[in-house]
Image (cartoon, helix red, strand yellow):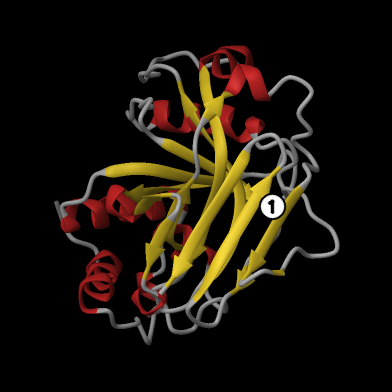
Amino acid sequence: MTVSTLAAQLVQARRQRTLIEDLESADIPADDAAAYAIQHEVLTLCGARIGAWKVGARAPGAPANTAPIDAELVHTSPARIAHASFFRVLIELEIAFRFSYALPPRSEPYSRSEVFAALGGMGVALEVVDSRFAQWPNLATLAQLADSQNNGALVVGKMEPYDVIAPNFDFLSPLLELSVDGVSIVPPSTGNPAGDPRELLVWFVNHCSAHGHTVQPFWTITTGSYTGARRVEGPSVVSGRIDRVGEIELTLE
């Protein structure tokens, strides 16, 4: 395997805790396929295994994107993580899903009904948004995609049975809370930009299938923020709740 310059830089940034100060235009991925290849190249070079994925879209029906998350960056709530282990900390409150059984690659696309029928659990998630680039967020979107789509860590709450929670659940505008040291940071309006996040799972499963990945039941798939990205400047306790789904807590030490 030929190690791309950007993959090598991202690995160095993770290992040495140093930001990438300059990004040459030649090192920006040419397209989504190149960015996805770099994601997996970084995981391979780090000797990492996939524990979760993030998937999102800017609007309902808009092109989606995804990124694998190193299993070592996936934490169970209540979690404790050093604030200084990140270059910056932005928090997103999300809903995450797990499948009941593996979905292997196949020639024909998985249908919406097949994907929904395979869902086994859903829970609250907190994504820590971070970037290995000094100029973030003023950065080419494909470079951000290559950098695990700006993932720093993922905290996952207790998974509840999907078939118990999903009926009559408001996936567009659920009742929720998010606070830092007891002070609410919920914006005036909330909602997942992709709309119903389950629609992203249909794209995700078929994306994995097309790339030869078996969707594993132990993967957690988090599906985009209901609150936007809220910056947390220093050590603190972040608490979140989504009505009927559960609660979550992250202590940034």
Query: Depth check: 181 or 226 in front?
Result: 181
Residue at (54, 82) in percent of width and height = 233
Q: Amino acid at mark 1?
A: Arg
Secondary structure beneath dot 1 equals loop
Please state, as top left, top right, bottom left or bottom right, where the C terminus lies in the image: bottom left
Give the image quarter of residue 201: top right
Q: Is residue 147 visible?
A: no
| Number of marks in the rendered image | 1
Return the residue found at the far bottom.
21
Give the image quarter of residue 203: top right
Q: Is residue 189 above or below residue 54?
A: below
Write down the residue under mark 1.
58
Query: Depth check: 61 or 90 in front?
Result: 90
Q: Is residue 38 above or below residue 22?
A: above
Query: Depth check: 68 or 221 in front?
Result: 221
**Residue 178 rendering spot, x and y as whole percentages:** 67, 60
Give the image quarter of residue 60: top right
**Residue 237 rendering spot, x and y as whole percentages:** 53, 68
Horizontal side, residue 186 vs residue 210: left or right: right
Q: Is residue 204 above or below residue 124?
A: above
Return the residue found at the far right.
188
Neighbor class of circle 1 (other Cα within 10 Å; few <14, some 14-19, many 20+) is some
Residue at (38, 25) in percent of width and height = 217
Residue at (74, 49) in percent of width and height = 176
**Residue 17 rendering spot, x and y as whole percentages:** 27, 79
Return the residue found at the far front.
182
Horizontal side, residue 177 vs residue 113: left or right: right
Q: Is residue 156 above or below residue 133?
A: above
**Residue 55 rendering spot, x and y as whole percentages:** 53, 44
Q: Is residue 250 visible?
A: yes
